[in-house]
Amino acid sequence: MPDSSPQIVLVEHAGEHVPVSVDFKDRQRLSISVHPDGSVTALAPTGRSLDDVLTHLNRRRFWIAKQRRYFEAYQPLPVEKRYVPGETHLYLGRQYRLRVHQSDKTFVRLIGRFFEVHIPTPKQPRPIATAMKGWYQAHAETIFRDRLRRCAQNATPLRFGLDVRLRVKPMERRWGSCSKAGMITLNTDLVKMPLHCIDYVIVHELCHLRIHDHSPAFFRMLGQCMPDWQQRKERLESMVMR
């Protein structure tokens, strides 16, 4: 009988060795899950050999690779900002240059094509970063709630009311998520993306409130709610590379 603790096997595809954590449980069928962080897990029936599981995983290696590529493209902005004057920062898909001014009080304003940060310590990046992140958080909460209301109204196949719960917070590896309890969480950094990309992420998560996986049924529902979701997704991916 296999060891009760998860075991790691390697599935090779296109020269890459992907580790898969295999856990044996009292169940009838073997299932494979690819998670948003790129990790892969498998649940196998107790008594099934590890070699047999690996054979099955190798048969599904193209699907595993496809799912991992999907999640790689659904990641937040990778570039670390330095928060120095002249640096560019995104907001709703447009680039704005950072200007820093010495002031007794700390506040941020968007004027023309510039982020104007007023702060007592203009030569210290950390307080500037804190001020900018606070500005983004406040604007994200306002914009996301408005877009969620609009998307919930327009996503006719879902028949949502206006009571969908929303949480906005920084997220390292995802643009959004939803819980089975009905809570949608959106990454604060999503406010840096164009509105049509924000709507795509929101509708994506709204569909997950009905279907919690990325099965064909999920994508059929997404297509019914947002026929051009693929173009919006591609736009989001292109913005991430900027």
Image: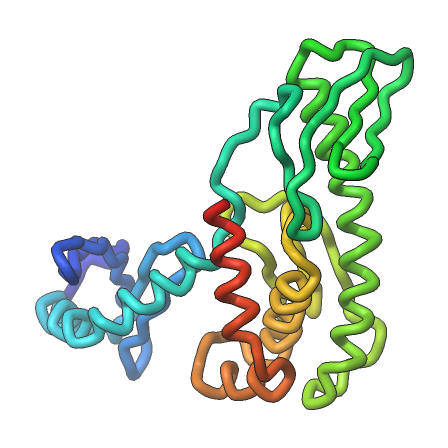
Q: Note whether 124 is above or below 230 in the view shown.
A: above
Q: Residue furthest left?
A: 51
Residue at the spot x=79%, y=24% of the render?
117
Res. 63 in view: yes
Q: Is residue 86 left or right of residue 240?
A: right
Q: Note whether 8 is above or below 82 in the view shown.
A: below
Q: Is residue 166 left or right of residue 230?
A: right
Res. 187 in view: no
**Residue 60 x, y percent position in the rendering:** 22, 74
Residue at the spot x=65%, y=73% of the render?
203
**Residue 201 x, y percent position in the rendering:** 61, 65
**Residue 234 x, y percent position in the rendering:** 49, 65
Residue at the spot x=56%, y=84% of the render?
223
Front residue of 213 and 66: 66
Front residue of 10 and 144: 144
**Residue 146 x, y percent position in the rendering:** 83, 63
Q: Is residue 85 left or right of residue 119?
A: left
In the rendered image, which quarter is residue 138 located in? Answer: top right
On-image quarter of the N terminus: bottom left
In the rendered image, which quarter is residue 137 located in? Answer: top right
Residue at the spot x=17%, y=57% of the render?
9
